[in-house]
Image (cartoon, grey):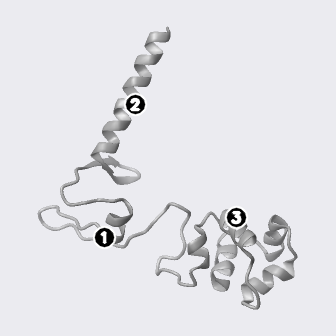
Amino acid sequence: MNEHLKKLRKKNKLTQENVAEQLQVSRQAVAKWESGDTVPDMNHAIALARLFNVRLDDLASGEESRYGIGPKGKHIFGVTTISERGHIVIPKKARDLFQLRAGDKLLILGDEEQGLALVKNEHFLTLVDDIFAAQNESDDVE
């Protein structure tokens, strides 16, 4: 955890003093957490995770993925290769997290500046239904 704290602090361009002020602890407490002499209690660990916008288990895991710790809810699952027929393999960790199963239909969205996005078709259709329902409600009010 101590190495994670130091990397996250530096990544966020904060000093130990900045972190200490935000958590209302001494700079020495932050220094001890980063050196591994002590560990933050649960309340301070939660505050650190919020401060750095990471999941608590990523902060505390002691294992840094080869991609580092990303913002909460953001993931890098690795790299895949597109076959000659246009097939891609979605990594198992991603399939598990997003509950993707064989036979699921995915909608592919594209933005020439930001790239591609895959969305479960059923979620997209629900969103479209909600948009139409909201539009109909606003038409009824006028």
Tell me where residue 57 sits by quadrant.
Answer: bottom right
The correct choice, above or below, for 53 with respect to 36 in the image is above
Residue position marked by numbered label 1 in the rendering: 91
Which residue is at a point 70% across and 72% down the rendered structure image? 45
Which residue is at a point 67% across and 63% down the rendered structure image? 50
SS state under label 3? helix
> At label 1, which amino acid type do we have?
Pro
Of the residues tagged 1 and 2, which is closer to the observer? 2
Quadrant location of the N terminus?
Answer: bottom right
Residue position marked by numbered label 2 in the rendering: 130
Which residue is at a point 74% across and 78% down the rendered structure image? 40
> At label 2, which amino acid type do we have?
Asp
Q: Crowding at label 3, few (<14), some or many (≥20) Cα neighbours within 10 Å?
A: some
Q: Crowding at label 2, few (<14), some or many (≥20) Cα neighbours within 10 Å?
A: few
Tell me where residue 29 sits by quadrant.
Answer: bottom right
Q: Crowding at label 1, few (<14), some or many (≥20) Cα neighbours within 10 Å?
A: few
SS state under label 2? helix
Comes first in the chain, label 1 or label 3: 3
Tell me if 16 is positioned left or right of 87 in this view: right
Question: Residue 65 location in percent, x, y?
Answer: 48, 80
Comes first in the chain, label 1 or label 2: 1
